[in-house]
Amino acid sequence: MVREYLGQSVYEAFQERMRFIFEEFDNIYVSFSGGKDSGLLLNLVLDYQQKYAPQKKVGVFHQDFEAQYTVTSEYVERTFERIKAKVEPYG
């Protein structure tokens, strides 16, 4: 596979993809494990939503397997508490 550089940053490409998603789909969901990657994605999506589509709610899914580190579970709980007015929580 050949790499093709588009002359835009990763953040600019993300914003472009978010614009497409928010324009084309009625329901938007983010799966949140409590890890650093899904935490970043969740925050980026909510930042976009707040700035460009405040009328849309974002669904956030988290599944607790009861085998996570305590610190991860606490982070998930704090995050849901902080964002509960902005999202539809699932899980």
Image (cartoon, helix red, strand yellow):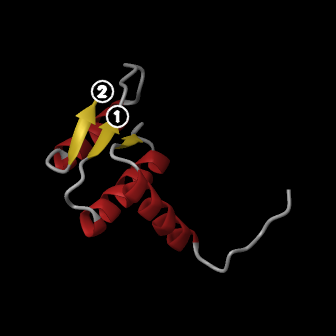
Q: Quadrant of the N terminus?
A: bottom right
Report the front residue among 60 and 19: 19
Name the outermost residue toward the right: 1
**Residue at 33% across, 30% down:** 70
Image quarter of residue 90: top left
Residue at the spot x=58%, y=75% of the render?
A: 9
Picture disc at residue 16: none
The extreme bottom residue here reads 7
User: In the rendered image, which quarter contains the C terminus?
Assistant: top left
Q: 76 or 3: nearer the eye? A: 3
Q: Quadrant of residue 61?
A: top left
Q: Pointer 1 and pointer 2: residues touching (CB < 8 Å)? A: yes
Q: Which mark is residue 91?
A: 2
Q: Is residue 25 left or right of residue 56?
A: right
Q: How many dots with numbers?
A: 2
Which percent across, then down, holds residue 85? 14, 48
Quarter of the image where one finds residue 23: bottom left
Residue 18: percent from left, percent from top: 44, 60
Residue hosting label 1: 61
In the image, what residue type sits under mark 1? Phe
Residue closest to the far top: 66
* 61 in relation to 45, above or below: above
Q: Secondary structure at mark 1?
A: strand
**Where does residue 40 sit, x and y in percent of width and height?**
42, 55
Q: Mark 1, residues whose alpha carbon is within 10 Å: few (<14), some, or many (≥20)?
A: some
Which residue: 24% across, 36% down?
89
Image location (x, y in percent) of residue 57: 24, 48
Give the mark nearer the N terminus: 1 vs 2: 1
Q: CA distance from mark 1 to mark 2?
A: 5 Å
Residue 88 to residue 15: above or below: above
**What residue type is disc 2 on?**
Gly
Q: Is residue 79 above or below residue 40?
A: above
